[in-house]
Image (cartoon, grey):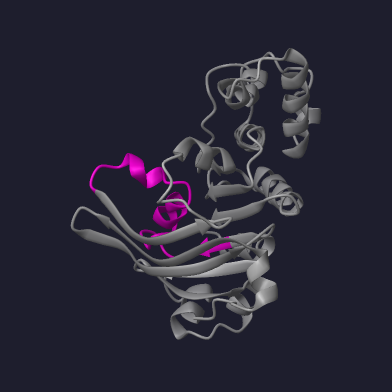
């Protein structure tokens, strides 16, 4: 597999994964995963259900640590730091934000949802929080829709709006990487389009890794695509190459709808 080891490309890599294996108890879920993820771009992870995409995504912010019986070997390096040799998981999850499949807002106001993380970090200044909330909601392309109802419950928003507030909540922590696990699968087509437009705008500021079942979405939003199958990366290349000239027959069979 081409891991793009050229010097110019190497400088642009934000995350380097080498020989990553993951076990749930005795069952191996990821097999020798090696991949370099470029800085300030969108990398899509595609493949059939149960192939390891979300499991891999969760290794990038050590969410799998929360599951009993998980064993991990190999290296994940973010900005030259091996995240599994560091004990500072809070720092890691500040740097590597996450947006889940379904909006998971807290039962509190829109404002308090976005301000929650910064407050937990010790930010008390009302002025600073006000600006942070506004900037985060603007970055998530939802400020104009909610600016007059910041004190209203976030749970009163539509699904698509809730998901964008979730993205704003992640942005408020000032991450460098944002992981998205099927962020539009629970949304209608119009809301999906808004989130895709948002992702396209965000990639100039963030490294984004997105798991998606929607291959059209991967083709629309990502710069690079990795095809997972049975816990392995079968092929990883520029998105255009994966969808138009894949090298592996299994990749071609999947992207043309022959299985999956």
Q: Is residue 103 left or right of residue 24?
A: right
148 is higher (above) or lower (below) than 243:
above
Residue plotted at (57% across, 16% down): 108
Q: Is residue 211 left or right of residue 41?
A: left
- Location of residue 21 in the rendering, given as x and y in whole percent from the top left corner: 33, 63
The image quadrant where one finds the C terminus is: bottom left
Residue 212, visible in the rendered structure:
no
Tell me where the magenta segment starts and ends, as one range.
44-69
150 is higher (above) or lower (below) than 42:
above
Residue farthest to the left, as pictured: 26
Residue 105, visible in the rendered structure:
yes
195 is higher (above) or lower (below) than 218:
above
Q: Nearer the viewer, residue 96 or 170?
A: 96
- Location of residue 74 in the rendering, given as x and y in whole percent from the top left corner: 37, 63
Q: Nearer the viewer, residue 103 or 113?
A: 113
Image-quadrant location for residue 191: top right
- Location of residue 184 in the rendering, given as x and y in whole percent from the top left corner: 58, 47
Q: Nearer the viewer, residue 161 or 113?
A: 113
215 is higher (above) or lower (below) than 110:
below
Q: Is residue 154 magenta?
A: no
Q: Is residue 46 magenta?
A: yes
- Location of residue 47 in the rendering, given as x and y in whole percent from the top left corner: 45, 66
Residue plotted at (67% across, 65% down): 12
Residue plotted at (45% across, 70% down): 34
Image-quadrant location for residue 114: top right
Q: Nearer the viewer, residue 202 or 255?
A: 202
Residue plotted at (55% across, 48% down): 180
Image-quadrant location for residue 127: top right
């Amino acid at each position: 597999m081409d891991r793009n080891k050229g010097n110019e490309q190497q400088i642009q890599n934000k995350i380097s994964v080498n020989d990553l294996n993951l076990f749930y108890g005795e069952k191996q879920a990821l097999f020798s995963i090696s991949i370099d993820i470029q800085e300030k771009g969108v990398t899509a992870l595609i493949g059939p259900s149960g192939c390891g995409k979300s499991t891999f995504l969760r290794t990038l912010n050590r969410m799998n640590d929360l599951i009993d019986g998980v064993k991990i070997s190999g290296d994940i390096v973010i900005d030259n730091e091996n995240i599994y040799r560091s004990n500072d998981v809070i720092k890691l999850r500040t740097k590597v934000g996450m947006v889940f499949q379904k909006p998971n807002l807290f039962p509190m106001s829109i404002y308090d949802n976005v301000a929650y993380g910064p407050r937990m970090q010790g930010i008390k200044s009302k002025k600073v929080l006000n600006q942070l909330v506004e900037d985060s909601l603007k970055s998530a392309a939802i400020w104009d829709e909610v600016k007059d109802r910041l004190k209203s419950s976030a749970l009163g928003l539509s699904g698509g709006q809730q998901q964008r507030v979730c993205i704003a909540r992640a942005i408020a922590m000032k991450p460098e990487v944002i992981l998205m696990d099927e962020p539009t699968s629970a949304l209608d087509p119009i809301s999906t389009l808004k989130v895709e437009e948002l992702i396209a705008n965000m990639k100039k500021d963030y490294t984004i890794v997105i798991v998606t079942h929607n291959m059209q979405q991967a083709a629309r939003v990502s710069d690079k695509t990795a095809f997972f199958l049975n816990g392995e990366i079968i092929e990883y290349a520029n998105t255009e190459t994966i969808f138009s000239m894949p090298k592996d027959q299994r990749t071609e069979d999947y992207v043309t709808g022959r299985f999956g």
